[in-house]
Image (cartoon, rainbow, N blue to C red):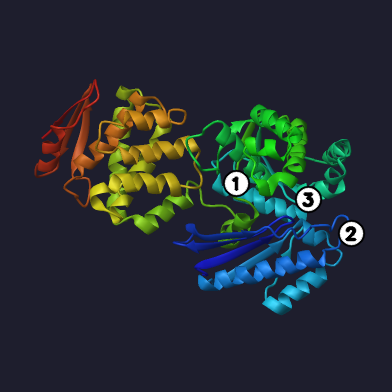
Amino acid sequence: MAKRTAVIDIGSNSVRMVVYEKTSRFAFHLLHEEKSRVRISEHAYQNNSNLQDAAIERAVDALRDFLTIATSYKVRKTLCVATSAVRDARNKKKFLSRVHKELGLNIKVIDGLQEAYYGGIACANLLPQLSGIVIDIGGGSTECACIEAGKVVDTSSLNLGTVRLKELFFDQGDIEGATAYIDKALQSLPLKQSQNIIGIGGTFRALSQAIMKKNHYPLSKIHAYQFRAKELKHHGKKILKANNSELTELHIKPERYDIIRPGVLILLRMMKRLHADTMIASGVGVREGVYLSDILRSNNNYFPENYNPSVTYLQDMYSIDKKFSSLMVHVSATLFDILHPIFNIDPKYRPYLLTATKLAKIGSSIHFYSYHQHSYHLIQSALEYGYTHEETILIATLARYQNKKGPSKSHYQRYATLLPKEALLHRLTFMLSLCNILLAHRPQRMDFNLELHVDHLHVIPHENTIHIAKERLESIAIPKPLSITCY
């Protein structure tokens, strides 16, 4: 088993590398990420699909540096794929041969359907489970994957890309020609209409970040960010008409100025074709798909049911006592099942409370006296995969304010658009606090019974009294209508 793996993706616009480290069988985390704006496809579409010498030189230089980085991390396996620009190039053998001869690197040129599949399984595994169309707008091509119930069921590839359209149409100011070219290509798109579009790639990330900034969104996390299609349509139309100075005001970075307009036009035409209502940004794509197909090859390229790699990674790296954490989850689950009817809490919140309980103490591995703050920051930043932003901030908030009456006013105001109502937060926080209190003596098993009589919870020890719990219960604020007696 290769503990550290590098994945290199040679795209039409950029060459990117990620270095991942496994922490257990399926859990992993990102150690390093690097990219170089190589533009290997530059002037290729104007020159009979031949890679130009200057572009090849830039690519070889970037790959040499990437391999140096991989060596510094003691990477055991390097996976390298090339997509549209290289697979379309008439002189690709020249490029592949040179890279192998000079760098000893074997590049796998993947076709459009394989590229679409990699992007699809990355989103299916690492986004919250949903159905929709994954769209990956690259420099030379656009790949699509249909996800239903968390599985990739169809893929397609179109010769639509930002660099391709820039060189063929936008450099000549032919927007009408570009639109007609896109619409003709979309006629062959076999995918049916979809409410959700899941966006991969630099164009979609740039647009999502622009909308986040425009809306003063409280999180800086792009992965799993959701917004309405009509908002992107409105912002995208402005971008198509903007000059470079106006693009800055629309929160587009300078390195995207020359290719953002072709990318926006492709996306707007696809949105119209699919009748989408909701846009979901993906921070993962082909590189993650290549990596997942490697580590999950014995599991049909999908994680086991109810498995989350981010939760497991956080436990692998920061949990001091997994056995006690399991006991905490058991007690927390018991409390929720007993108390959610009288607190009028929807059962859908149960898994979020249990995840918060599972990760509640991970911050103590950094500093005991401020463990709840460290747990909060670790969860908010590193609970990367499988959760919506609302779910992530809820789980992090419960961990942050365990052993307190509930979130502070400033915290709630900052994340009000993502969090449930304050009363619900207070009751969920109370359950985690009560779990901590009942297990303050750190037993090896649940050595007490919990019995609810109307609105009164009885905590009945099996043998000796649980003195610390009785003492701490006297100072905790118990939400109405509940009352508690600890014997």
Q: Position of residue 437 (x, y in %)?
A: 20, 40
Mark 3 vs mark 1: in front: 3
Circle 2 sits on which residue? 47
Mark 1 vs mark 2: in front: 2
Report helix, strand or loop for mark 1: helix
Q: Residue at horizontal 33%, vertical 51%?
A: 362
Between discs 1 and 2, the one toward the N terminus:
2
Q: Residue at horizontal 47%, vertical 61%?
A: 25
Q: How many marks?
A: 3
* 84 and 162: which is toward the camera: 162
Report helix, strand or loop for mark 2: loop
Circle 3 sits on which residue? 163
Name which residue type carries label 2.
Asn
Tell me the distance, in whole angstroms, between the alpha carbons under discs 2 and 3.
13 Å
**Is residue 34 something that shows in the picture?**
yes
Tell me the distance, in whole angstroms, between the alpha carbons under discs 1 and 2.
38 Å
Name which residue type carries label 3.
Val
Circle 1 sits on which residue? 124
